[in-house]
Amino acid sequence: MAQNRIETSDATLIPKKGDRQLFSAWRISFFGAIGILIFLVVYKPDPFGRILLFIPDGIVKTFQVTVFAIMLALVIGLIAGLGRISRVRVINRVATVYVEVVRGIPLLVQIFYIYYALGRIVRIPDIASAVIAMSVCYGAYLAEIIRGGIQSIHPGQMEAALALGLSRSKAMRYVILPQTLKVILPPVGNEFIALLKDSSLVSILAVSDLLRRGREFASQTFLYFETLTVVALVYLILTLFFSWLVGLMEARLNRNVK
Amino acid sequence: MSNNEKIRIENAVKVFNVYKQELRDSEEAQDDGSKAHVDKPAGLMDRNRHRRRSVRRTQLYALRDVSMSVHMGEVVLVIGPSGSGKSTLLRCINRLEELTDGSIWIDDICVSDAKTDIRKVREEVGMVFQSFNLFPHLDALDNIALAPIVVKKNDKPLARKKARALLKRVGLADKEHSYPAQLSGGQQQRVAIARALAMDPHIMLFDEPTSALDPEMIKEVLDVMLSLAEEGMTMLVVSHEMGFARAAAKRVIFMDEGEIIEEGPPEKLFVNPDQERTKRFLEHIL
C-alpha cells in the first residue's frame, strides 16, 4: 500500500494519508478514551458503572438534538449562503444581516431567547426550541463557509457552464455546488463537531441531554468529579466518532482526484 | 445582411471600469491626484495632511470600434499582443462580456441586445478556453454529456452514446472514465472541444486553445481543430499558431489596443504585412 504512494515533496504541508501510522493521533485519543472508560468501569464499578448506566438516554437526546440541528442548519446555511452571493440586492442584504446578527449573539443567549420568546407565542416542545436555536446559530456559520466555498471555485467553471447554454441556477446545481461540497467538507465537519459540543448548552433548558443527565446523577450522589469525568469521556468519544465519519466522507469525495 | 455571413460585428466598443482605491492628500487631489504621497505616513500633528481614501475610476478600452464578419464555413484567426482585446472580442460574441456599444449579430440574432435570450445563442456557439475549464468532478464522458442532458433534455443513454462517439472522434475513446486531473493538458483540451461539440454548435470560438499546452501536445489539439475546419465548421480562433493558420485559416486579423490593425490571408499577412505595427509584432513571435 505504501509502495504505491508517490513521494511527497518538502513543500507538502500536511502528511498524506499514507503517512499516517498505526498510532495516529485520532487512534490514540479515541481508543485511549474508550480504554480509560472501560478501565474505570471495571476497576471501580460502584460509581462509574452506575454513572454509565444512568446516562444512556442523555446520549440519545444529545444525538437527537445534534443530528436534527445539523440537518436544519445545513438547509438554513445553504439558503443563506446562496443568498449571500445573490445578485438580487434585497436577498443579499437579508442574508447578510441574518449572518451578522446571529453571529454576534452568544449561542447561550439565543437558546434562552428562543425558548422564552418563542415559548410565549407558540407552545413548542423544549427539544424543538433547542434544535431551532442551535440550527439558526450554526446556519449562519455554515452560510459563511458555503459562501466561501462557492467563491473558491474558479470563475472559469461558471463561464464554461454558461457557454454551454446552462442557466446560472443549473450551472450552480450541476457544476459549482458539487465542487463546493468537496471544499467545504472539512470546515463543515468542524462545525458539526462544534455543534455536538455546544449541544451541551441545551441542558440549560429542560432537555435532559448528556450533560444534564450527568448533573442529575451528581446532584443526587454528590459525585461531581467522577460523573463529569465520564461525561467528558463520552463527549470525547462522540466527537471523535463524528470526526471519523467526516474523514470517511472526505476520502469518498477525494476518490476521483489523483 | 448578406446571407452567408455567420457572425457580424459592427462598431463594437467594450469599456472596462477599473476601480483603484488609493490614499490621496486632499490638497493635492485637486491639482493632479498623483499617487506620490501614498507611502508617506501621515504625521500625527500635521494638520495639512488630511488624507482620505478615494476610489478612482479609470476606463480601459478593450475594444474600440471593431467591425468584422465571419462567413459561413470560414476559419478566421485573430492574433495580437496580450491586452489587445482579442479574448474580449471572442467573449462578447456569446455575451460572457457585455458590449458597451455597437452590435454583434449571429445569423439574424442580435447577441448584444439585452432582450435576446442569450442561452439559445450559447447553445449554438461552442467555446473552448485556454485553461480548458473541464468540470473536475465529472469524468470525461459526463463532462461531454452534461450539457445535452441538462440543457437539451436528452435522455442519459443517448447523450452518453453521443459523448462516446465524440470522444472517439477526438481520439480519446479509451479515456471515457478518466477524470480531468488524470488527463494530460492536450487530452483535457480535446475533451473540452468534444464537450463544446456535444451541443451541435454552428460556430466554434477558440480562446487561445493551445497556449497552456506543452509543445508536444499542441499538435494533437490542432489536428482536431483542423479536422473540424475541413468539415466546414465556422471558426473564430484566437491563437498564434502559424501552422494552423496556413493550413486552415482563410483570413488572419491582427489586433492591437482594441483595434483591428490589419487583416488578410495568412500568406500575405504573415509574410508581407502592410502595417509597420504588424511587422513588429510578427518579428516577436516568429
Image (cartoon, coloured by chain):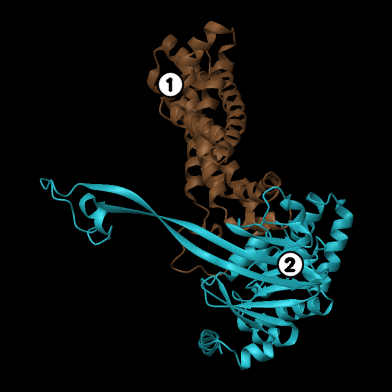
Chain colours: A brown, B cyan
Residue A202 visible in the shown view:
yes
Q: Are marks 1 and 2 in contact (CB under 8 Å)?
A: no
Q: Secondary structure at mark 1?
A: helix
The alpha-carbon separation of the residues under discs 1 and 2 comes to 63 Å
Q: Quadrant of residue B65?
A: bottom right
Q: Quadrant of the N terminus of chain B?
A: bottom right
Q: Chain of mark 2?
A: B
Q: Extreme front residue here?
A: B1
> Residue B124, how many percent across, how many down?
78, 60
Badge 1 is on which residue?
Answer: A108
Say which of A21 and B116 sits in front.
B116
Q: Chain of mark 1?
A: A
Q: Quadrant of residue B58?
A: bottom left
Q: Quadrant of the C terminus of chain B?
A: bottom right
In the image, residue A195 above or below residue B130: above
Q: Extreme bottom residue here?
A: B271
In the image, residue A20 above or below residue B211: above
For label 1, the crowd category at 10 Å Cα-Cα, with few meaning under 14, some 14 to 19 and many 20 or more, is: some
